Image (spheres, rainbow, N blue to C red):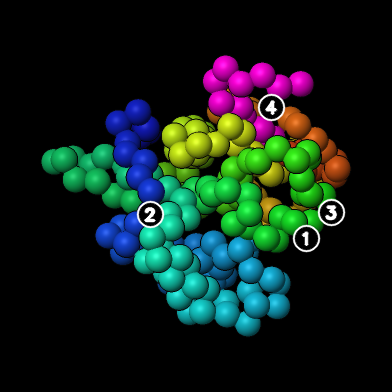
Amino acid sequence: MTDWRQAEFLPVTAERWDDLVRLFGERGACGGCWCMWWRVKRLEFERQKGTGNRQALQHIVFSGEAPGLLAYAPLPGGERAPAGWVSVAPRAAFPALERSRILKPVDDLPVWSVVCFFVDKAYRRQGLTVALLNAAAEYAFANGAEIVEGYPKDATAGPQPDAFMFTGLMTAFQQAGFTEAARRSPTRPIMRRYREGKHHE
């Protein structure tokens, strides 16, 4: 079991691009997604699935925008390995959210969104998703966010396609200090975590 307190959580920049590629592997994390699902229109996503999505994400990274964080697990001898990924950015970076009836804005407050996770199979079921969530929230707050939002699956509310598992589980968000802000589907709550000291209803 990895102690994630000893891990590093770093934004994906050009010099870390190869580490992200190593983590995602040939399938681009899942079916050629390369974490572009929330960033482009569905037809565009399908058209560029695989190599096109990889190039699109690489363009974002090399343009100077960090689309998310990498978790580096400590290894013997002081080495480290890319173990997990979380996509976090201002909500406007994910236009697919705006086209979702279920995930439309809760209010007019500006938020950062956590939309996707990917964990290497060697590190699954070890609490890394919660650690990634905490790191994503801290990163967002350090960059000016007042509210961080996520869109997990509530596994207790009924069956749902596994395709939605990449957004995380509600229990992980709860463990990371997120609370439910809205729910327009039995299985898809909108969870929020507020900057410490910020008042909210």
Q: Which residue is mark 4?
A: 179
| View extreme (left): residue | 77
Residue type marked 2: Val
Residue 124, image x and y in percent? 47, 44
Residue depth check, mark 4 versus mark 1: number of the one nearer the observer:
1
Distance of mark 3 from mark 4, alpha carbons?
A: 20 Å
Residue drawn at (75%, 40%) of the image: 108
Q: Which residue is mark 2?
A: 12
Residue type marked 1: Arg
Give the secondary structure at mark 4: strand
Residue type marked 3: Arg
Distance of mark 2 from mark 1, alpha carbons?
A: 27 Å
Distance of mark 3 from mark 2, alpha carbons?
A: 30 Å
Q: Main secondary structure of the magenta part?
A: loop
The mark found on residue 101 in the picture is 3
Q: Which residue is mark 1?
A: 99
Asked whether the beta carbons under mark 4 and mark 2 sit within 8 Å of each other, the answer is: no
Residue 45, image x and y in percent? 63, 74
Mark 2 is surrounded, within 10 Å at the Cα level, by few (under 14), some (14 to 19) or many (20 or more) other residues, namely many
